[in-house]
Image: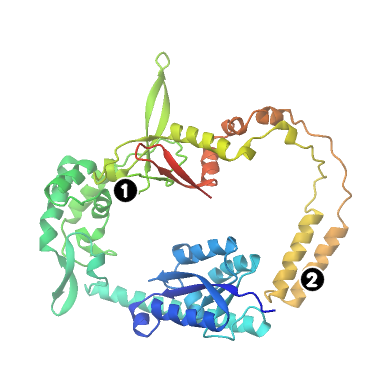
Amino acid sequence: MSDKRKRCAIYIRVSTSEQMMHGKSLEAQKEYLACYAEEHGMTPVGVYADEGKTARKELKKRKAIHALLEDVKAGKIDVILFWRLDRWFRNMSDFYKVQDILDMYGVSWISASEPGLTMDTRDGRLQLNVVLSIGQNEVDTTSERIRFVNEASVRQGKVIFGDANMPRGYKVGIINGRKCMVKDPDQEELVNAFYDYFETHQNKQETVRYIQRNYDPGFSYGVLRTMLSSEFYKGTYRGIPYCPPYVSEERWARLQQISRQNIRQTPSGRVYYFSGMIRCPSCGRLLTGTGCKSVINRKTQEKRDYCYYRCGRALVDQLCTNTHKVSQNLIEHDLLDLLEQEFPSCRLHVSTIQKVQKKKPAARSAAQISQELDRLNLLFQKGRITWNYYNEQSRLLEQEKLQLPEETAAPDPDDSALISALQGNFRAAYRLLSPENRRAFWRNTIRQIHLKPDSTIDFIDFL
């Protein structure tokens, strides 16, 4: 009987144009690994590509890795295939964070061009750690060298980034045979008008609209924030004179003071449950929280905070047609209705509450000690701890287990408050949560909320 073909995930990564020139392009890696999978009886089920990412980049910024791990947790993958270990990781701590997840779900990996690297043997693990250490040291050395060269270039006024990353109003120019930052004649009038208008009117939204009407319809609030915070516009970079300025140091300080006065502080009692979770039905941008106070008692002048969500691209930049504000209370009410309809198990009944005998307080229970012994065994099997350490810790844990006191029943606790809280349904229990706990509940339940054009809920992407 032939063995079942393993489901293989192909992971590819390229970070620089130099790697592209040396045959390490994404397409070259993909083709090589697809042939490898076919020759070794594996079935590719997906290609996960990180383009323009270094292996020392923070793990959270490598989106393909996260997509791959989600499929690992969903049980869609048996083995991960990559070209070389340095395509996978050059950071030991991140490597073992991901390795722990792979071990948990029984997924292995193969470095196609390095058959000696493996987690299955002692020699393989040793070679793996050596390669990771050398790779990490190599990247750190390169980073230090690049930082030193960049600092020297900045002091000499040389440009260290391309046109695509130039701030508004600047471009790359040649001065005395070297590339430098110079003012862009096509944008110079816009930049000067921006600072003049903002300094005169001291209003950020009005400044954005003025520039949109007279110079650039695509000018956004994000560009305004950059132009009011980037030191390039006063002619410096990292505190060093670097490029021709648009404003003097004195005027820059004045503009910063005006900018700070424009910042509206969010009231401390206002809690937004769904920030970063609701998509604009028109442009797809995430809605941002806003709010207001309203008098609810004319005699006492008591006020209440109300939270809403709006599209900043519509109300600030005026680049979207969706000017409707979505009420947090309405979204919350609709979501509770939806949960009760879709998940009847959320209803909590007193009949399901069982009295549990409690143990006397102890440092650790027998189950916890057994779990720690299992974890210790796993670490030793993987070669991550020595025999002496394993032997000593095992002995201490077995000793601790023998000294556990016998379990005795404690008096039943007074569950009247709990029964009262759960006598109704899920909504009754929800009402007992604080605003902060409600926000935590939704963030651990929902990934994203999609709205219809009339701003009612279209569908929910649950976690």
Q: Residue at x 68, y 28 (%)?
A: 423
Q: How is the image coloured?
A: rainbow
Q: Identify the residue position indicated by label 2 in the image.
A: 392
Task: Pick whichever of labels 1 and 2 is earlier in the sequence.
Answer: 1
Q: In which quarter of the image is the N terminus?
A: bottom right
Sort mark 1 into few (<14), some (14-19) or many (20+) by Cα contacts within 10 Å. Answer: some
Of 8 and 294, nearer the camera is 8
Occupied quadrant, residue 302: top left
Of 452 and 374, nearer the camera is 452
Q: Which residue is drawn at 17% across and 78% down?
A: 178
Residue 13 as seen in the image, left or right of residue 202:
right
Q: Which residue is drawn at 75% across and 60% down?
A: 371
Of 342 and 384, nearer the camera is 342
Q: Identify the residue position indicated by label 1 in the image.
A: 283
Q: List x then y, in percent, for residue 304.
A: 43, 26
Sort mark 2 into few (<14), some (14-19) or many (20+) by Cα contacts within 10 Å. Answer: few
- Looking at the rendered image, the disc whose residue lies closer to the viewer, 1 or 2, is 1
Occupied quadrant, residue 377: bottom right
Q: Name the secondary structure under disc 1.
A: loop
Q: List x then y, in percent, for residue 290.
A: 36, 37
Q: List x then y, in percent, for residue 248.
A: 16, 56
| Amino acid type at mark 1 | Cys
Q: Can see residue 90?
A: no
Q: Name the secondary structure under disc 2.
A: helix
Distance from the alpha carbon under mark 1 to that under mark 2: 61 Å
Which residue extends farthest front? 1
Relative to 287, say whether 328 is above or below.
above
Q: List x then y, in percent, for residue 256.
A: 25, 49
Residue 396 as seen in the image, left or right of residue 231:
right
Question: Is the residue under label 2 in contact with that under label 1 (CB below 8 Å)?
Answer: no
